[in-house]
Structures are given as structure tokens and as C-alpha cells.
Amino acid sequence: MMQDADRSTDRDPTEPVEVQRYGPTPQRDPYRSNWQAAPAWSNRPGARSQAVTVRRGLGALPVIVIAIVAGIASGALSAVAVSNLLAEPVEQVGAAPAATPGADRVSDVRIDESSAVIDAVDGVAPAVVTIRTQGDGLGAASGTGSGVMYDESGWILTNRHVVEDASALTVILNDGRSFDGTVYGIDTLTDLAIVTIDGEDLPTAPIGTSMGLEPGQLAIAIGNPLGYENTVTTGIVSGLGRQITASDASQTSAETLRNLIQTDAAINPGNSGGPLVNSAGQVIGINTAVSTNAQGLGFAIPIDVARPIMDQALAGEPLTRPWIGVYYVPVSAAIADEQDLPVDAGALIGTTDGGSSPIFEGSPAEAAGLRVGDVIVAVDDVHITMEHDLSTLILPHAPGDTITLRVLRDNSVREIDVTLGELPADN
């Protein structure tokens, strides 16, 4: 599990857990009360009035008329009351129960929510695997992570940091079967890797899409945190388009990850490489990092970012990523105000440290004539936003494809064609 760069905390999974039990909450005696007045349903006779007022009575004819009218009205009301009592109650299908104080009807909603999670887990959990790694060299540490099988031929998607330094892999399925695993390839752009095993009757997880996700949607994380296999945690999609600087547990390396899904579903060491699932039981992301200095901050790589390398592996091709060859700063309202830019979204070619040139020598960007200070605002007529940055929009393309960038330069707009290269392994 990659962590943020703030700090790293390792916990011993075998440490005891103290459970405290408390006696039942004292119940108030319902038959005791400090209320002194007689209750409304008391059958105690009321005090007889001591004062009597004498009034002159009505004549005989008015009394007869009033009696007749009162009888008719009383009969009609009685008929309605009796019919209501005799009528069978009619259940309104789909109608929400009345919010009666003290009525225990919340369980109806709770059952529906639980069923959605249970169904989603049933469809994905069999394809969630445990990956145990053995380090290379004398005294090298071993580790445990997660993965998800996306093809019945034995193709598994996981995190790069789970398998990158491993000399041997063991893949354990949910049904207990164990296989030797092989790293097919490592993604040069994100913290992803492809592992393959050789087996039969292998389960697969339904693969969804991360496009169109919205904050507030149900999110389910499945993995093997701290060695507890197939642990399920739930939460929501807390945010989109997040950028973090993540480091490994030893704090010896770090990398910047962009366009991540933020979730408050509990993610712990060992969840790395496991799936983030929606309420339809589809994989929408791969869990990759958790904050160690704040609760409720977990991150996953969108499944649409992983899809190109998944397809490359199935086709037997090496894992490659397209490359323009520039450093850029995502444009926000604050950056636009600071740099006096005419737009508040895009990719500003430049660096924040003022060091080396942000345009790589011999890169596709240099060949296309891109310059420092250019603001790329669209790729093939698709506008760049904080949720869909430059690197995300070029991901569906392969090295060698030509794309058209819309660029702001000196307060003018121009279209520039760029033929994509292959992302070097060290970038």
C-alpha cells in the first residue's frame, strides 16, 4: 500500500484487541411518575359542579326540528365511521412508510442497501486475489497485496509497488487455489502492473467505467488488508481528479499520481491492487494509496486509466504509454489569476521550480514547436478540466498516433498537431 509522504505508520496485525462490555442501560420504571394530575384516560369521576345555572327551555316545535336534523347528521357520520372500520387496509406498493415516532421502519431501507453491497461483492470477490511476494536478495522483505482478475486466461491487474521488486510471486484465489505468478509488465505512467497465472476455470470481475462518476456515489473496496483476505469496506466517492505525492512504506521513493478517485471507504496496507467497486458490482478503480495522517482519505486509479494497458496485455503487446514530452502545471483559478491567463482550465507548459526546460529535448513537443508558456486547452476538441487533465486525455491513444492540441499563445488560439511518442521508463 502506497502512503502519502507525510508519515508512515506500520501496525502489528497480531496485537490483541481489547473488548469492553458494558451492562445494560438502566431502564426507567414506566409505572413510576412524578406526574400528579389524573391521566387523560383516567376513569376517576370528575368533581361535581357546585354551581347550577337555570335557563328557560325552548318551545316544543323547535326542539322537534333540531332533533330530526341532529339524527340525520349523526346517522350519516356513523355510517362513514363503520365503513372505515370494516374496510380492509390497502397497502400502497412502493409508498414510503410514514415517519411515525418510535416506529422501527428504518430496517426496510437498511436491507435494500445491504443487498446492493452483498450482490456487488458476490460478483467481484471471487476474482479478487492475494499476491504474496518474495524479495530479491538475501534478507529482502516479503510482502502481501491484492489484485483483481479481469480475464479468464489469468490476467490480473494490480499495483506496480506490489510486484516491482519481487523475485517470486504467489497468487492465491478466493477459493484457496494457489498459483505461481509472473509479472507481464509494469506501467510507466501510473502505479499499475499486469500479472498473469496459468490455470483453468478462473473467475473474472465485471469491468465498468470511471467516466461519469460523481461524488456521493457508493464505493466498495475489496482486498486483503493486514493479511485478512477478502475484506470488504464501504463508503462513497469523496472526490475526483485528485493529485497526490505517494511514497512507499519505507519512504525511500515517491511519485506524483494524478487524476485519482478519492474515497472514504477504508483502505489499509494490503488493499493495494484490489478493486474499488460501484453499486452495480463493476470495477471502477484500483486502490493504490492511503493517507497516514488523516482518516477517510483513500485513493484509487480510475479503471479507464488502466484499460489501455489491460487491452495491450490481452493482445500480447508490451505495455506502453503515449508521450508528448512536456512538464506542465494544471491551470486553476488561482494559477490563472497569478499568471494573468485568459482561461481558468488547461495545461500551462512550465515548471514551478524554475529549473530545467519543461520541454524535453528530442520530444514530440519540441518537434511540434510547442513553447514554454503555451497553455493547452483542448485535445482533439475535448476541453481540459481539473478532472480530465492533459495526460488523461491522451491515454486512449497509442504511441505513433497524431493528435491536435488547441493552444493559447500570446492571447491567440492556434491548432498544433503532435505525433505522440512512447513514454520512457524513467519518466
Image: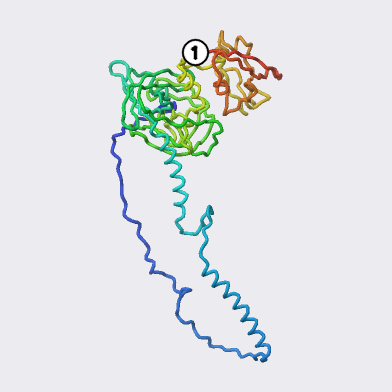
Viewer can see residue 358: no
Measured as percent of width and height from the top left, residue 361 is found at 56, 8
Q: Amino acid at mark 1?
A: Pro
Measured as percent of width and height from the top left, residue 271 is found at 39, 31
Position of 301 with respect to 379 (left or right) is left
Measured as percent of width and height from the top left, residue 287 is found at 44, 30
> 277 or 196, which is in the foreground?
196
- Find the residue positioned furthest to the top: 362
Q: Residue at x 54, y 29 (%)?
A: 241
Q: Above or below — where is 58 with respect to 364?
A: below
Category of crowding for the residue at label 1, using alpha-carbon neighbours closer than 10 angstroms: few (below 14), some (14–19), many (at least 20): few
Position of 206 with respect to 324 (left or right) is left
> 331 or 69, which is in the foreground?
69
Which of the 4 image quarters holds residue 29?
Answer: bottom left
Regarding mark 1 in the picture, which secondary structure is present there?
A: loop
Q: Residue at x 58, y 28 (%)?
A: 386
- Find the residue positioned furthest to the front: 201
Viewer can see residue 88: yes
Q: Residue at x 46, y 58 (%)?
A: 103
* Residue behind mark 1: 424
